[in-house]
Amino acid sequence: MPVTPTIIRFCHDIWCLSSPVQMVESDSKYFYVVTQVTPFHPVSHIWPDHPADKGTLNQYPVIDCQVGAVELSSGQLFVGCDIPVRRDEKGWVFVVVHCLEKSCTNLCVGQEVTLAVDKPYQQALGRGHSAGHMASLALNKVLVELGYWRKDAERKDPHGYCDFNSYAQLSSLVRKDQCVDTYRLGKTLRKRGLNSADLLNTLKKVEQEVNIQLSQWLMLKSEIKIKCCGDTLADSRYWQCDLGESGMAEIPCGGTHARSLEDYNEIRVTLTQLDEQNIEMYTHVLAI
């Protein structure tokens, strides 16, 4: 039987389930197991900002969890950065690949296995990821309201503010109860209308205003939702939260997240200048 796309359950508050094995493979480093269904979130091979979940498969430690793609005509599995196609390529299916130690060779296709995610670890990553989204939205708003844009940029965020985060973000790294975003204030951004020099000169003022905004949003205690447009990795997913602005905040995102602003006691950011053109936003969470 051909391999089918993995049905994902990491957006459904499911941390343990049973599923039959669809495929097993091995290389010089890992023994790979692909199941029909999984509660594990894999690290993305395209934008690896959110780490893979931890946990067990039949009590074997899941050392890593990656995205895989199977060519149906050949049955060949490609893992992570070796994937040669886009997710909508015909004749291919995308799967979650659980990476175990090479000694776990007694697992076989058709076998029913139990997959259990480390729930506290997944939830800590989710809080950090949602906090990163909120911090980027707050930064976008503050930069507009304090007049750092000398002209109206074309690209807007979900609240209608100039999308500094989208224009300037170089990298984003989610960790337990934290997120670190790096931004480049280059020539292109200045041409789009950002007063980069003013921003660098008053970075602590911006930091203060972002933290005030985050505190105000947390007082709303809004629900955080993940809108899933299907049950597989290839289907789109969106982070949603009503922050009392012009409309619902909705951001395309494949990661795991907090379930409510009530999960937070505090979200605070620190803005740091790295060099003449780069700044870092460190977002830290104090959970309830």
Image (spheres, rainbow, N blue to C red):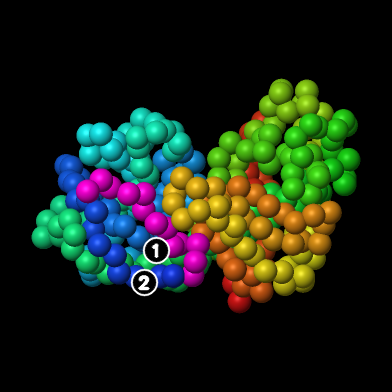
Q: Residues within 10 Å of mark 1 (few under 14, many from 20)?
A: many
Q: Amino acid at mark 2?
A: Cys
Residue 11 percent location from the top left of the image:
50, 62
Q: Quadrant of the C terminus?
A: bottom right
| Left or right: where 43 falls relative to 139 | left
Which residue is at a point 60% across and 57% down the rendered structure image? 227
Q: Which residues are magenta?
A: 1-13
Q: Amino acid at mark 1?
A: Pro
Asked if residue 91 is positioned above or below residue 94 in the image, the reply reads above
Secondary element type, mark 1: loop
Determine which quarter of the picture holds residue 193. Answer: top right
Q: Is residue 228 visible?
A: yes
Q: Is residue 2 magenta?
A: yes
Secondary element type, mark 2: strand
Q: Which residue is mark 1?
A: 39
Numbered badge on residue 16: 2
